[in-house]
Amino acid sequence: MPLASDTVREITALRVRYPQPRSAILPCLWAVQNELGYLSAEGMEEVAAILDLAPSEVQAVSTFYSMYFAQPAGDHQLLICVNVSCALRGADAIVDHVQSRLGCPSGGTTGDGKFTWESTIECLGACGGAPAMQVNHHFHENLTPDRVDGLLERLRAEPRPSHANGQSVGHVAEALTVKAPSSGPHPPSAETPPAPNAEGPPADTGVSDPAFPAPELPLGEHTEMPGSRSKRSYTKRGSRSAPRKRPRPNAGDL
Amino acid sequence: MGEHKLLTEHFGTEGLQTLAVYERVGGYQGLREALSRFTPETLIDEVKASGLRGRGGAGFPTGTKWGFLPKDVFPRYLCCNADESEPGCFKDRALIDENPHQLIEGLLIAAYALQVNTAFIYIRGEYHDQRLLLERCVEEARAAGHIGANVLGSGFSCDVIVHGGAGAYICGEETALIDSLEGYRGQPRLKPPFPALKGLYGKPTVVNNVETLSNLPHIVQRGGAWFKQLGTEKSAGTRLFCCSGHINRPGTYEIAMGTPIRELLEEECGGIWKDRSIKAFQPGGGSMQVLLPEHLDLPLDMDAVAQAGSSLGAGAMVFMDETTCMVNVSMRLVDFYHHESCGKCAPCREGTYFESDLMHRLEAGHLTLEELHTLADICDNMNGKCFCPLGDTATWFVMSAFKAFRDEFEAHCGAGACPVRTASAQLVTA
Ligand SMILES: Cc1cc2nc3c(=O)[nH]c(=O)nc-3n(C[C@H](O)[C@H](O)[C@H](O)COP(=O)(O)O)c2cc1C
Ligand code: FES
């Protein structure tokens, strides 16, 4: 299916925005993903044609970046950080909670197509408000299971946002007029970020084994997180071949 | 010493993200002065005199870097590095969220000094709202004549392009950033030639961090000498420290260089949470080596921290309390590098894979002591042998933690579960 004329216009405008047209690949791919929800082969071919590149070159670029989806995703996308600062303040508990609420593992999409969620080891840049996640590219910080529940409930009622990651040209007008919330106090205020519960979030430093509370879901209800670079879900670890054995007598001499 | 507000002075001012309010608090005065009082050469000298060092991690003197551009080769390019993805780091986001025009003003000052007519802001894909905000601010500044042809009637012209990434930590490395901006997979390039000679589109290019650039309006207005007397002899100015982890008040704090780390922890961050004691901290972001409570009296000075065997890096401080399992923390950082390895060189691509595999088995208590030695061996085979620092830094935390907490690492071997978690569960309930 050819891209909408608006998208084609946007890509054509991006082409002349840079000293060299090829620089426009990333924003052009965003334009495609904004329209389709993912990068289709045909969409990438159109980008290639407009930028005067081989389709394979555009595809090769797309697979390098983790935010492009290779398959359609749910209406709302949740990305939960499990890097150190978030883990120190209970990110694993949030991951477990989301998993039990949505009933599919990290990287999956709910059966009703409403949510795609993933736990990510990429620090989102919200460590001051840990544990944190992004929902449709907006930050949500100082998470607690209760807050997550409230958020999920609200999102369930909302339709898919029209521009998941709108790129400049044409979308500047809709840029924020409201100040984006920042991570932690800047400048430092006397106020502590809201305590998630009376005791504060659990100092959870362990990776818990996922217990899937959801019963067996029919096949086809889960899709792999589109765009994942063959990355495994963080909490569940597949078996791997053992590393080559090349023992060293004493690790202490490092 | 202690808290000293320069970049964050006006944070929290209602509407600071608009041009009108920013100008009301003195914004774009630095740009005006740069254009009227300085030539590009004298401006570079002023920045050299200020002692400003890059805030992106490596701490390279900014004026010196600018001086490397070959004379008479045009066009040249300037890239603001807003790819901030270092674990524990969120200061650039704060600088953009709170005071985006300060960054744009700094970018324009640098562009004038370097005689650059096209400047880019490469911002990570996850900072979606921040990108939209910057785009709006650029349009606003353009409409006011601060960007575009004949900036403020000076005869100098500069366009600013905000470019969003799409999720790749490595694109923060300057040559990978350039590759990505050219429309390729973001993989680092061999240096030399350094970007100052052959960078974007093969032309002389300077890459500077958000915080580095945000300092420039202040240096121009108050003078390099004034800036230099803030902080310590070799670390001039203030820095934004991103404090996170087990502390009472996580957040970004701007303080003068040279302040003791303990003061940052106790006074700004409100100390370790839940009345616990500190076990360890990481002073520079996910890449840097672990430091111990005995290092808390070190001054926040790049060289002093380097002497203690770590680095201030990008200014992230992650504090860990006594219940923290260092194996678990190491595992997450190793996983991060495994996930972010760009695949260009074998030591990093394969090494992070094995590191991650071993760390997961260690954390679960299923590694043998012999395999622990394999882990050390693998790290030894990576450090200093990778194409770019990503692979090297993938070993720094885990190896420093192994050295400092060797008992803890060994106690995991064959334990069948994390011994620290079990112990700290008792501690919490006790
Ligand atoms: C793997 C890697 C990631 C990096 N990420 C960033 C980053 O996110 N932001 C940044 O400003 N510098 C980053 N750097 C440092 C840049 O390569 C470069 O030194 C810096 O942008 C220069 O700016 P400065 O001189 O103003 O510090 C990274 C370096 C490496 C090796
Ligand atoms: S560690 Fe989670 S946002 Fe930084």
Image: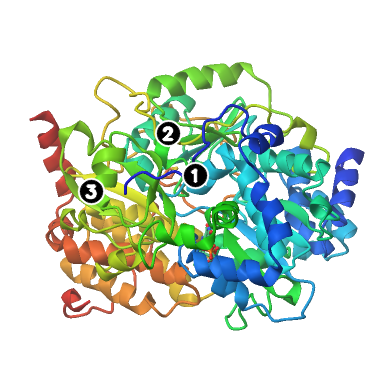
Considering every residue shown, the one lying at the far left of the view is B430
Q: Amino acid at mark 1?
A: Leu
**Could you tell whether A183 is left or right of A203 in the image?**
right
Judging from the image, mark 2 belongs to the subunit labelled A
CA separation in Å, label 2 and label 1? 17 Å
Q: Which residue is mark 1?
A: A124
Residue A208 seen from this side: no
The kind of secondary structure element at disc 2 is loop
Q: Amino acid at mark 3?
A: Arg
Identify whether B329 is placed above or below B51. above
Task: Say which label, 2 or 1, has the lower sequence index.
Answer: 1
- Asked if marks 3 and 2 touch (Cβ < 8 Å), the reply is no
Identify whether B182 is placed above or below A122. below
CA separation in Å, label 1 and label 3? 27 Å
User: How many neighbours does mark 2 have within 10 angstroms: few (below 14), some (14-19), or many (20 or more)?
Assistant: many
Dividing the picture into quarters, in which one does residue A144 lie? top left
* Residue labelled 1 has its Cβ within 8 Å of some atom of ligand 2: yes
Q: Which residue is mark 3?
A: B262
Judging from the image, mark 3 belongs to the subunit labelled B
* Callout 1 and callout 3 share a chain: no
Considering every residue shown, the one lying at the far front of the view is B37
Q: Residue at x 85, y 55 (%)?
A: B150
